[in-house]
Image (cartoon, rainbow, N blue to C red):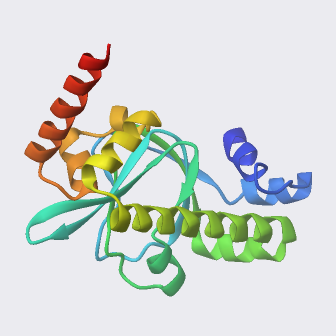
Amino acid sequence: MQPFRAFIEKYQKLSEPEWEEIKSCLMQKTYPKGELILESGKICSKLYFIEKGFLRYYLWKDGNDVTKFFTEAPYCFTSQRSFTNNIPAQENIVATTEAVIWEMNKTDAFQLLKYQNWSEFIRKLIQEVQFFTEQILEEIQNHTAEERYIKMLEENNPILTQAALKDIASYLGIAPQSLSRIRKKYWSKKQKLT
């Protein structure tokens, strides 16, 4: 539970009474690798904090699963549209490794907004998620899959060690065979430079 407090306090300091109230709203659950945390078509009624593990968000399109993005610990997550608007989620969220997750129901999350520091934390978190979303869209619009993959390599993106190659390919919007070609080309160039 302490990692969640540390995560919140990267954005906003909490008083002890506020933390005690937040703590009382949390329940821990461990999801084994491969277990769905949220299934498309169901309403997301929880705010989650991933303390340990790695998650993949995907949609079903023409009978195939298409990776939207990933979340690594520590971070907060939910299906924002479903959670906020009380509508069925479009995405599935699955644990790609064993995941330790703290869950808070929607009623509690909204009641905690009476605390200015919780409210400020949520506001900053939403802004950050919007920034990340815009950044991903901008990269998709302005860079090829190969350029995006190379950037991931250069930044030591944890996706590369935590996600299956087929899911990385799906995230980049290409077939696994195309990703194999990109990887082979990249590593042969690297070897020529050394």
- Work out whether residue 84 can be spotted: yes
Q: Residue furthest front?
A: 193
Q: Residue at x 47, y 37 (%)?
A: 155
**Quadrant location of the C terminus in the rendered image:** top left
**Left or right: 142 in relation to 110:** left
Q: How many marks?
A: 0
**Left or right: 124 in relation to 84:** right
**Closer to us: 90 or 125:** 125
Classify residue 170 by image quadrant. Answer: bottom left
Instruction: Give residue 44's position: percent from left, percent from top.
Output: 44, 72
Q: Residue at x 66, y 70 (%)?
A: 109
**Left or right: 102 in relation to 13:** left
Instruction: Give residue 11's position: percent from left, percent from top.
Output: 76, 55
- Work out whether residue 31 can be spotted: no
Classify residue 123 by image quadrant. Answer: bottom right
**Quadrant location of the N terminus in the rendered image:** top right
**Closer to us: 91 or 25:** 91
Q: Residue at x 19, y 40 (%)?
A: 182
Instruction: Give residue 154's position: percent from left, percent from top.
Output: 43, 34
**Closer to us: 77 or 183:** 183
Q: Residue at x 29, y 23 (%)?
A: 190
Q: Residue furthest top?
A: 194
Above-or-below relation of 18 to 101: below
